[in-house]
Image (cartoon, grey):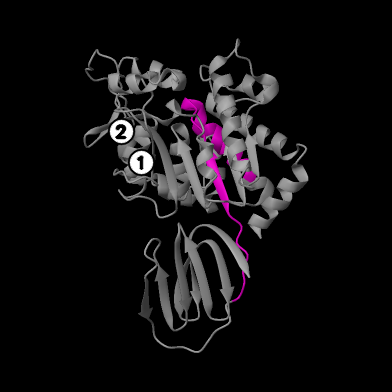
C-alpha cells in the first residue's frame, strides 16, 4: 500500500516506531521510507538506513517481536499560506480561516505546515500557540472568546509598544542594492528600491517579546515557516526550514520589519527585513512538500477583475507574483485554493476607518464564501471533507 505524507509523522509498527515522510510503503510488519534521498527500512526485527553516495547500510537491532499487520490509514495533508498585509492582515486571515472552520469543520490548527509572511507570520504563530481561528475572529470583532483562548493570551505580559530609536541616515543595504542591480538582465527592482530606502525608526522588539511569551520562548512543536529577507544580501530566508538561528519572536519581528518603517531585526551579525520584499505570499514554498491541498489566504492581492497596474500597481505586482507561485505548486500536482479580495471585499479593507479590523474579518469571511462557491466548488468541498474525516 502507498501512503503519501507531506511532513514527518510518527506511527507505530507493532512495538517499534517508524518515522514516515515522502512516499511510504506499508506491509505486514514492514515500513519502508524515502526521505530527501535517504532510504529507511523498518521491520519488527531491525532498522536499516542507506545513505546516498556510498550506499553503505547500517543495521540497528530492536527487541524481537512477532510480525504485526500494520493497518492502512490514509492521511490527508494541508499546507496553509498566510500573506503579508499590515494591520489588515491578521484580521483578514482570521476571517478567512474562522469561516473555513465554521463551513467545513476543518480546524486550521491541524494544518501540516503553516507558512507566514509579515502579518501572516503573526496569525501563523497564534494558530500554533493553540488559539482557534474562530476565537481570533471574535477577538477582532469584540465578541467573547473561549476560556481556552483567554488562557493562551494570558501568557503575554509585555505591553505592545513601537518606540522610535535613533537611526543611521544611510540607505538600508548597499550590498543588497548591488546584488539586486547586477547582472542587469536579472535585476530585481523591488529589492533595488528597498535597499536604497532609509532605515526604519520604529522598534519591533515588543512584538518579538510577546510572541516569545506566547510560546514560552520555544519554537512551536508543529511545523511553521516564517519568511523574511536578509538585509545583508537580499536573500529570502525561511525560519523553521533554513539553517538559521532565532526564536519564534525574532523570526516574526524579522518577517514584519517593514523597510523604512521598522528597524531591521538583528540576529547575531545578520539583519532581516519584511519577507514581503520577496513576495507578499511566498506560496511557492508550499510546492516541494507535496501536500494534498494548499490553501492561500492573501489580502495584498486581488481577483483578476480587480487588478490594475495604473490604479494599484503594488497589488497588481503581488497578484502577478502569486499567480506564478500558484502555478508552480499546481505543476507538482497539488490543488490550490486561493482566497483573495474581490471588489466588494476591497471596499471594506480600509485601515483608516473606525472598526477596520472587524471589517477586515468580514471581508475575509465573505471572500472565503465566494472562493468555495466558485467553479471548482465541488472538488474543493470533497477535498476538505477528506481532511475532516
Question: Neighbour class for label 2 at 10 Å: few (<14), some, many (≥20)?
Answer: some
Left or right relative to 114: residue 348: right
Name the residue at 58% across, 54% down.
77
SS label for mark 2: helix
Q: Report crowding for label 1: few under 14, some 14 to 19, many 20 or more residues within 10 A (C-alpha).
A: many
Percent across and percent down for residue 53 are: 38, 61
Magenta segment: 71-100
Residue 23 horizontal/vertical position (percent): 56, 62
Residue 126 pos. (x, y %): 45, 43
Is residue 210 visible from the viewing direction of this image?
A: no
User: Does 309 appear in magenta?
Assistant: no
- The C terminus lies in which quarter of the figure? bottom right
Q: Residue at point 41% right, 48% down?
A: 152
Residue under pointer 2: 206
- Which one is nearer the viewer's eye here, 134 or 369? 369
Q: Is residue 344 left or right of residue 92?
A: right
363 and 276: which one is in front? 276
Evaluate whether residue 265 shows in this view. yes
Q: Residue at x 68, y 24 (%)?
A: 304
The tag earlier along the polypeptide, 2 or 1, is: 2
Q: Residue furthest top?
A: 310
- The residue under the point 39% across, 86% down is 63
Is residue 78 inside the magenta stretch? yes
As drawn, 314 above or below 157: above
Q: Secondary structure at mark 1?
A: helix
Nearer the observer, 329 or 316? 329
Displayed quadrant of residue 28: bottom right
Determine which quarter of the picture holds residue 171. top left
The label number, if any, that marks residue 211 in the structure image: 1
Amino acid at each position: 500500500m502507498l501512503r503519501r505524507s507531506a511532513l514527518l509523522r510518527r506511527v507505530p509498527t507493532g512495538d517499534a516506531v517508524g518515522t514516515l515522510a515522502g512516499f511510504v510503503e506499508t506491509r505486514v510488519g514492514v515500513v519502508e521510507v524515502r526521505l530527501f534521498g535517504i532510504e529507511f527500512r523498518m521491520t519488527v526485527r531491525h532498522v536499516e538506513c542507506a545513505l546516498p553516495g556510498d550506499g553503505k547500510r547500517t543495521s540497528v537491532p530492536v527487541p524481537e517481536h512477532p510480525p504485526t499487520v500494520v493497518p492502512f490509514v490514509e492521511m490527508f495533508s494541508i499546507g496553509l499560506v498566510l500573506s503579508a498585509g499590515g494591520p489588515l492582515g491578521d484580521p483578514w486571515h482570521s476571517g478567512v480561516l474562522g469561516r473555513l472552520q465554521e463551513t467545513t469543520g476543518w480546524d486550521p490548527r491541524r494544518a501540516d505546515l503553516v507558512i507566514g509572511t509579515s502579518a501572516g507570520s503573526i496569525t501563523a504563530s497564534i494558530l500554533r500557540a493553540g488559539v482557534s481561528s474562530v476565537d481570533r475572529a471574535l477577538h477582532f470583532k469584540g465578541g467573547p472568546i473561549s476560556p481556552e483562548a483567554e488562557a493562551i493570551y494570558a501568557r503575554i505580559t509585555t505591553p505592545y509598544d513601537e518606540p522610535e530609536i535613533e537611526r543611521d541616515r544611510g540607505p538600508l543595504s548597499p550590498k543588497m542594492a548591488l546584488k539586486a542591480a547586477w547582472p542587469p538582465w536579472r535585476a530585481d527592482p523591488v529589492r533595488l528600491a528597498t535597499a536604497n530606502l532609509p532605515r526604519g525608526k520604529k522598534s519591533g522588539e515588543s512584538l518579538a517579546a510577546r510572541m516569545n511569551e506566547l510560546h514560552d520562548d520555544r519554537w512551536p512543536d508543529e511545523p511553521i515557516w516564517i519568511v523574511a529577507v536578509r538585509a545583508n544580501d537580499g536573500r529570502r530566508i525561511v525560519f523553521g526550514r533554513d539553517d538559521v538561528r532565532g526564536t519564534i519572536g525574532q523570526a516574526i519581528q524579522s518577517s514584519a520589519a517593514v523597510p523604512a518603517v521598522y528597524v531591521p531585526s538583528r540576529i547575531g551579525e545578520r539583519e532581516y527585513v519584511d519577507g514581503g520584499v520577496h513576495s507578499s505570499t511566498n506560496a511557492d514554498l508550499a510546492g516541494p512538500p507535496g501536500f494534498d491541498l494548499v490553501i492561500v489566504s492573501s489580502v495584498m492581492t486581488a481577483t483578476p477583475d480587480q487588478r490594475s497596474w495604473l490604479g494599484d500597481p503594488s497589488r497588481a505586482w503581488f497578484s502577478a507574483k502569486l499567480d506564478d507561485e500558484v502555478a508552480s505548486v499546481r505543476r507538482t500536482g497539488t490543488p490550490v485554493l486561493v482566497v483573495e479580495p474581490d471588489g466588494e471585499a476591497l471596499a471594506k479593507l480600509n485601515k483608516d476607518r473606525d472598526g477596520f479590523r472587524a471589517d477586515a474579518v468580514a471581508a475575509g469571511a465573505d471572500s472565503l464564501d465566494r472562493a468555495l462557491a466558485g467553479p471548482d466548488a465541488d472538488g474543493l468541498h470533497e477535498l476538505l471533507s477528506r481532511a475532516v474525516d
